[in-house]
Image: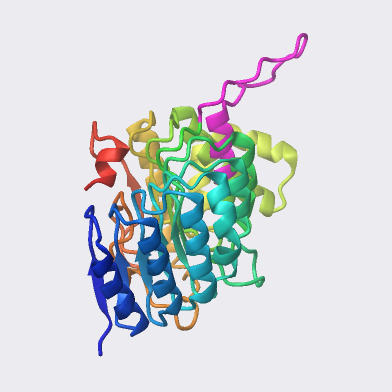
Amino acid sequence: MLAASIQVSGEPLSAVEVQDICDRLREDGVRLLSVRGCRVSDRDFGRLCRGVAASRCLAQLNLNLGVVSSIGRARHLADALAANRSLQTLFLHGSPLLDAGLEALNPALAAHPALVCLDLGDCLLGDAALALICGMLPPDGAKSGLRELTLSANPRISTKAWARFSVAVAHSSQLRVLNLDYNPLGKEPEPEPEPGLVLMGPVLSAGDQIASMLAVAVASSRTLEVLDLEGTGLTHQSAQVLTIFFLLFLLFLSGLTAHVLVLVLVLVLQVFLDMVENYPTCLRVLVLAENKVSPELQQQISDLLSEGEEDGREAPPPPPGHAPSCALQPIREKPLPWLPNSNSGPPTVMLTSGVGESLLAENER
């Protein structure tokens, strides 16, 4: 029997319907299960999780929009993931997990042998949860890890936690797609300078600091192809920081002295396009929509990505036995105009998106 898909959205599920789903899961008759936004009792949710645990062919599980609504349900799901060996993609977008919920899920998520795509957008996560997520992005040769990660709309995360996360991204040996859209990266106030301290240059805002750290992560990553920063509060200065720090990191790798690095700041845009030829990045799509970044600077970044694409550096092949994520669509609550794991097509800086639409409206599409 060929494995099928079961997709139900926003409907109440009766005990009979849940039993039918569980039976098909145990018979390995379901490859994709989506119950996004569905209302199900705690008892029936536990039964669904036991069905997931027993399945040997389930590849994608969509529990978006509040299905995992309590710590008890998070523990049920953790038990299911600990027993399951086939799941590749898990969507929990819009689930009120909080840090405690992710802590319950973390051992099973980190140890799962096949999981490569995880959506934790709008899950009310904080610093403790992000620290756990860093462990799901292992460095080179350590173990398999996530290839696609969504952390959209988690405003409780601090600048300090994003800094640590940037380091994990820089060293990840697997991550290709990172969605950080609708996180207010610039929300924290700028610190007041100490009395008598003479500043030699502009003070970076919290958003600019995160932009610089992400730039270093992108520059050093050998796998990251898509970075979504839509609606994150980045400004023209933040985008300049992305460009400047990316260049500085590349120059640092080339062994140039600090004096040369200072001089580069004056000619950053002109030199940048020359340097990328020798130090290309894997990044192909950078989403900057709904940020206060000028079209001119976005075009400069787009030109930079185009220069890097001409180098033709290939991304590492998918792990053995893993199906391409494009075979298990749909992927996100907020769609991206990009086909996962495709090396064709030009690099892109997304300049616009649905104006005036809230994140909630996009989630309900």
Residue occupying the point 23% across, 61% down: 8
In this rendering, the answer to whether 272 lies above or below 48 is: above
Label the magenta part by its dominant secondary structure: loop
In the displayed image of the protein, which residue is found farthest to the bottom? 1
Q: Residue furthest right?
A: 196
Quarter of the picture containing the N terminus is: bottom left
- To which quarter of the image does residue 307 belong? bottom left
In the image, 285 versus 77, the foreground residue is 77
89 horizontally vs 209: left or right: left
Q: Is residue 175 visible to the viewer in this orientation of the structure? A: no
Q: Which of 13 and 83 is in front in this view?
A: 13
Q: In which quarter of the image is residue 159?
A: top right
Task: Write down the region rendered in magenta.
Answer: 186-214
Residue 242 seen in the current view = yes
Residue 137, percent across and down?
59, 60
| Whole-percent x, y for residue 174 in the image | 54, 66
Residue 7 appears left or right of 107: left
Q: Is residue 211 magenta?
A: yes
Write the residue at 37% across / 66% down.
Answer: 61
Q: Is residue 93 magenta?
A: no
